[in-house]
Image: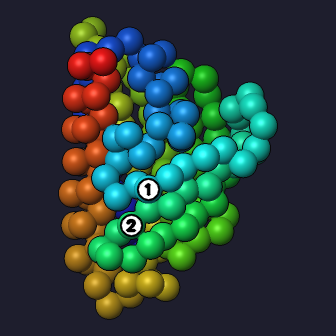
């Protein structure tokens, strides 16, 4: 099992940050390796909403269907894969700060099916990838 926690502060109001990261169709704009993401359920966004994404990681295409399992408007959203070659759960938390918004990502996955022998290496790669993604998110939101 892999668990990675990454936080970053973004100089934007927390409701704007949450709105952006909770719209999963924005994922290809700020997440490396993300090819496509689209909702497969009708709005409004909440527990039970679903979306599909296609990403590449370490040269492998990963197709995933996600379901929102927890949702607190402008605070927290948790998704888990319901169909994937790489089972994963992602929690995104936004917290207002004196200056800006703290964004935390908690990524948990089971690499045993695809990358079992390289699980320690996978944790390092996932952490670097998530750190890079949240730096991209910060840059994109602060300069838009």
Q: Which x, y percent locates residue 24?
A: 54, 41
Q: Secondary structure at mark 2?
A: strand
Alpha carbon distance from label 1 to label 2: 7 Å
Q: Which x, y percent locates residue 40?
A: 72, 48
Residue annotated with mark 1: 35
* Foreground residue among 33 and 123: 33
Which image quadrant: the C terminus? Answer: top left
Q: Which residue does the image show at 78% across and 37% down from the upper left?
A: 42
Task: Classify residue 139 by image quadrant.
Answer: top left
- Extreme residue in the top direction: 98
Apparent side of residue 60 relative to residue 142 in the rendered image (left or right): right
Up-down relation of residue 14 to residue 22 (above or below): above
Apparent side of residue 32 relative to residue 48 in the rendered image (left or right): left
| Coloring scheme used | rainbow
Task: Classify residue 33 by image quadrant.
Answer: bottom left
Q: Which x, y percent locates residue 83?
A: 65, 68
Apparent side of residue 98 relative to residue 47 in the rendered image (left or right): left
Residue annotated with mark 2: 56
- Extreme residue in the bottom direction: 117
Tell which circle, 1 or 2, labels the residue nearer the N-terminal end: 1
Q: Which residue does the image show at 70% across and 34% down from the upper left?
A: 46
Dot 2, how many residues are within 10 Å of its Cα: few (below 14), some (14-19), or many (20+)? few
Which image quadrant: the N terminus? Answer: bottom left
Instruction: Say whether residue 100 is visible.
Output: yes
Q: Are marks 1 and 2 in contact (CB under 8 Å)?
A: yes
Q: Secondary structure at mark 1?
A: strand
Dot 1, how many residues are within 10 Å of its Cα: few (below 14), some (14-19), or many (20+)? some
* Foreground residue among 142 and 11: 142
- Extreme residue in the front direction: 35
Q: Which residue does the image show at 44% across and 43% down from the upper left?
A: 27
* Foreground residue among 47 and 1: 47
Instruction: Say whether residue 69 is visible.
Output: no
């Amino acid at each position: 099992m892999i668990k990675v926690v990454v936080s970053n502060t973004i100089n934007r109001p927390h409701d704007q940050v949450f709105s952006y990261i909770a719209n999963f169709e924005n994922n290809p704009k700020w997440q490396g390796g993300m090819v496509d993401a689209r909702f497969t359920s009708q709005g409004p966004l909440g527990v039970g909403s679903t979306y599909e994404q296609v990403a590449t990681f370490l040269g492998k295409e990963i197709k995933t269907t996600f379901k929102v399992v927890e949702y607190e408007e402008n605070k927290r959203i948790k998704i888990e894969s319901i169909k994937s070659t790489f089972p994963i759960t992602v929690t995104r938390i936004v917290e207002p700060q004196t200056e800006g918004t703290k964004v935390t990502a908690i990524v948990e996955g089971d690499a045993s099916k695809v990358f079992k022998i390289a699980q320690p290496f996978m944790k390092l790669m996932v952490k670097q990838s998530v750190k890079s993604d949240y730096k991209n998110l910060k840059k994109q939101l602060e300069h838009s």
